[in-house]
Amino acid sequence: MTDAYVLDFVRSPRGKGSRRGALHGHGPVELVTGLQHALVDRTGLDAGRVEDVVLGCASQVDEQGANLARTATLLAGWGDRVPGVTLNRFCASGVDAVAQTAGRIRGGDLDLAVAGGVESVSRVPMFTDRGPLWADPATISAVGSVHMGIAADLNATLDGFTREQLDAYAVETHAKAAAAWDAGRYAGSVVPFTGPDGEPVTRDELVRPGTSAESLAQLPPAFAELGAQGQDALVAAAHPGVGPLRHEHTVGTSPALADGAALLLLGSRAAAEAAGLRARARVVASATAATDPVVMLTAGQQAVEAVLARAGLTAADVDVFEFAEAFAALCLRFRRDLDAGPDRLNPDGGTIAMGHAFGATGAILVGQCVAELEAREGRYGVAAVSGAAGLGVAVLVEREPA
């Protein structure tokens, strides 16, 4: 068995997932090719030695269709012989791209590869693919599929989390993200892109440093109307014992939609040495999980628990958890169940503050996990994402000494 290592990590800043967003002028292929060029520039990589490019993307239609990974790799000038594949595990697509690629390296099928993800929500909006899970009433009824926000409110109801607790978590993550940006903790991985005014976009656009409990308290529930339109009835049919659903999440305690992309260079130790690069972290293990598609959003935490068990570790052994903030209630449960306080859970802020670019989010989290382990000289870190339909993926990494 060959160990798989993270050799480098680059990402775009995250822009608002709207036509007014800072990255709306860049198509998803352009976001990926820009990072491919940056990866070569900063590492001196011979791109022709890359044996595959694996990208996660949740809405594979229109500009994000037709195997975007292969398209981007051809346009980046990496040569005809570098393959590419695009996979979809909904919001967990990016972390799954890393997990699958690392597994192929460990198994000896690859020596050097790029894994990551991309999503341009402003150009290819959520649900654009019109899949049966979103658009076919018979499928929705048969599987009990609900909107992610309804699932978040269900989880808050099941765990008894209050509106005030959810708001407090959102205040915390915005403050941590703003402090991390001001301290330059993201500077080593973020590749600037040109904004609509011609100036470089160098920071995540969605962070609001002045977010307060008072400002969040003014926001109305985000999913109550959706619930009244039939989604609450789906929940009641699947979980009749829950009682009335409390709609506690707002746009302030939900992940902000974003445009973005991220790439990780992965390889064996022999590949790293041949390329003249240092192995930054070992990908120890990964795990996937699935759960009830109505409760839905607990699968990411289940994947974390599974990957720790697989590696013979406990939550206490982990220095950093980078857990996608798929609504505040899930983070409060994670913190409670795994005793992961603010210093270990998303220590530099998360997707509620900086944005959720579906296919890219998990890859961003893996890269950020490695960077944070290096900054604090920690040993183990876990990156994980909960996705639609009750899916979750987690990746466990171990920092290599400098």
Image (cartoon, grey):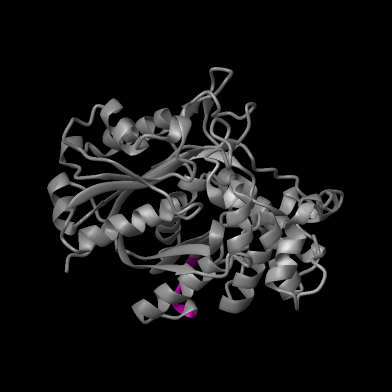
Where is residue 152 drawn, in percent x and y?
Answer: 68, 61
In reply to whether residue 49 is colored magenta, the answer given is no
Q: Nearer the viewer, residue 155 or 131?
A: 131
Where is residue 57 drawn, in percent x and y?
Answer: 44, 44
Residue bounds of the magenta highlight: 316-320
From this view, report whether residue 277 is shown above or below residue 341.
above
Residue depicted at x 67% and y 62%: 151
Where is residue 230 drawn, in percent x and y?
Answer: 76, 55
Residue 361, visible in the rendered structure? yes
Based on the displayed image, in which of its 4 quarters is residue 14 positioned?
A: top right
**Left of 58 or right of it: where is 246?**
right
Based on the displayed image, in which of its 4 quarters is residue 79 positioned?
A: top left
What is the quadrant of the N terminus in the image?
bottom left
Residue 178, visible in the rendered structure? no
Where is residue 394 drawn, in percent x and y?
Answer: 43, 64
Q: Nearer the viewer, residue 365 or 153?
A: 153
**Left of 302 or right of it: where is 327?**
right
**Left of 209 or right of it: where is 349?**
left
In reply to whether residue 317 is colored magenta, the answer given is yes
Q: Nearer the viewer, residue 77 or 368?
A: 77
